[in-house]
Image: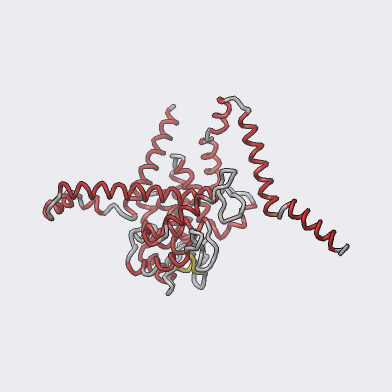
Amino acid sequence: MENQIPMAMATATEIERGTKTQEDQWRVESQVFQIYNLFRGIPPNSQFAILELQRDKHIEYLTKGFKQLGRSFTVLDANRPWLCYWMLHSIALLRDCVDDKLENDCIDFLNRCQDPKGGYGGGPGQMPHLATTYAAVNSLITLGGHRSLSSINRRTFYDFLLRMKDRSGGFRMHDGGEVDVRACYTAISAASVLNILDDELTQNVGDYIVSCQTYEGGIAGEPGSEAHGGYTFCGLAAMILINEVHRLDLPALINWVAFRQGIECGFQGRTNKLVDGCYSFWQGGVAALIQRLQLIVNDQMGLSNILECECSTDSDYDSINSDISADEQSLEGTSSHVNEMFQIREEGKKLKRTQTVC
């Protein structure tokens, strides 16, 4: 009995100290509290200056990344299209663009990553992979322009996607690779934006993603796994793109995402995990998609009411459709997204010209 007392005391002490995960959580909370406390003691004008996005410095940093990266980036050799995407997309979000030489260099490099049989590898000569394919396609669309878009071989690209299609309804990341929700999203998204998405590609994709939604409400990478922020975004986005989002348990999904926001105000990727900056994108992205869905539903309900009131006959409805030009009807997939990115790119060029004149 005497030997059992110290063990009991040790157990109580261990419980009081907490597990390693709990201690890490408390440490993060303490650090965040100190930052908030420090921020609260700063005058309002200084607070504004601290929160201001250093746009010019970000653009300078991102542009330099195209020319030279440090040795620590060698581990990302198989992710080079992702580096292009992260930098190009960030520059576009900052309403700027790269110069013509850098643009042409990016197009040439990504073209060397394109496999003759379709898809893009992580670098020249590397095997095609759905993740780097997604990054390459979105990089080229962000650049926009005829040279950039025409460099994508949509025929071999489609063949590559068909090869990655799995009998389960999902997609493989690469030849002989894993089947998961990431692959579903990257394949469906890339096909959608290139306007090559068809019934053969979407067949049973919804079944696979629905089977990945867990009892918690979030979506796992594969059936039977744990709900995860990244996979939840990918699954929801893919279901929206194939028009099957109604098959998901959206109330449960929303509830799960809402409770992934921690006391620090950041998001965690899974239940009882630490907050992480990347999940502000994944979980925040889910919230943005849900908000967009709500707007679409409201618009459709409004349109439905108008049609019921004003379009009582089929001929009236046909006349409304005839007012939509062929050009407007074609603005889906590649067309609409490229148009949006082209506008951002042109705004960036105008801003640069203004800055040069000033």
- Compared to residue 8, the image places residue 287 above or below, namely above
Horizontal side, residue 18 vs residue 276: left or right: right
Quadrant in the picture for the N terminus: bottom right
Residue 114, how many percent across, how many down? 45, 62
Q: Residue furthest right?
A: 2
* Quadrant in which the C terminus is drawn: top left
Question: Which is more toward the observer, 17 or 295?
Answer: 17
- List the single residue furthest toward the bottom: 167
The image position of residue 287, as x and y in percent, is 45, 49
Is residue 29 or residue 101 the one in the foreground?
29
The x and y percentages for residue 261 are 54, 48
Numbered label tally: 0
Give the residue furthest to the front: 1
Picture residue at 42% right of the left edge, 53% below the top: 140
* 103 relative to 194, above or below: above
Q: Which coloring applies here?
A: secondary structure
Instruction: Please name the residue shown 44% across and 43% down the image.
Output: 92
From the viewer's perspective, tell me whether residue 198 is left or right of residue 211: left
Residue 214, percent across and down?
A: 50, 63
Q: Nearer the viewer, residue 319 or 94?
A: 319
Q: Is residue 131 left or right of residue 13?
A: left
Q: Is residue 281 left or right of residue 207?
A: right
Q: Residue at x 52, y 70 (%)?
A: 177
Along the line of sight, the residue nearer the viewer: 244 or 332: 244
Residue 6 position by quadrant: bottom right
